[in-house]
Amino acid sequence: MAIFKTLLVVLQVLSALGVIGLVLIQHGKGADVGAAFGSGASGSLFGATGSANFLSRTTAVLATLFFICTLSLTMLGNYKPTASLGVMGAAPATAPAPAGASAPAAATAASAPAAPAVPK
């Protein structure tokens, strides 16, 4: 279970870093200032609008992965198995000790050394 939690944490951190990176790469609708610094998309690998679609879809996939990892880690962190209390919800009753069982307990109490007396 610890390996699964570690894997989820690593996946969550990587997806978070991916979302941060992809959001910083994308340009908004008002990218006029960005075009002045050479971020024109017409000559890019994906075409004029292809990179925007690719980046936005990849961001959505990574954000969904981050959300699923977060929910899974929350559910795993809150899971605490408890012992069954039975049908009635009460603790199971213990059987009374047999009559012969109290004799050895008394013998061990008698054989234990007594505490030294402290003068007043």
Image (tube, rainbow, N blue to C red):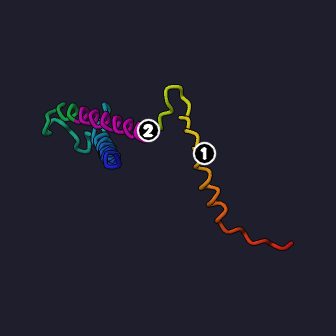
Crowding at mark 1 (Cα within 10 Å: few <14, some 14-19, many 20+): few
Element under disc 2? loop
| Mark-to-mark CA distance, 1 and 2 | 43 Å
Residue at (32, 36) in percent of width and height: 63
Element under disc 1? helix
Residue 24 shows up from this direction: no
As drawn, the residue found furthest toward the top would be 88
- Identify the disc placed on residue 99: 1
Q: What residue type is labelled 1?
A: Ala
Residue 101 shows up from this direction: yes
Quarter of the image containing the C terminus?
A: bottom right
Residue at (31, 41) in percent of width and height: 19
Residue marked by disc 2: 79
Segment colored magenta: 55-82
As drawn, the residue found furthest toward the front would be 100
Front of the two marks 1 and 2: 1
- Identify the disc placed on residue 1: none
Q: Position of residue 12 (x, y in %)?
A: 33, 43
Q: In this view, does 109 lie above or below 16?
A: below
Q: Where is residue 57 in the image (x, y as percent from the top left)?
A: 24, 32
Label 1 or label 2, whichever comes before in sequence order: 2
Judge left or right: residue 115 versus residue 82: right
Residue at (58, 48) in percent of width and height: 100
Residue at (46, 40) in percent of width and height: 80
Q: For residue 39, which quarter of the picture?
A: top left
Q: Where is residue 25 in the image (x, y as percent from the top left)?
A: 27, 42
Q: Is residue 111 above or below residue 56?
A: below
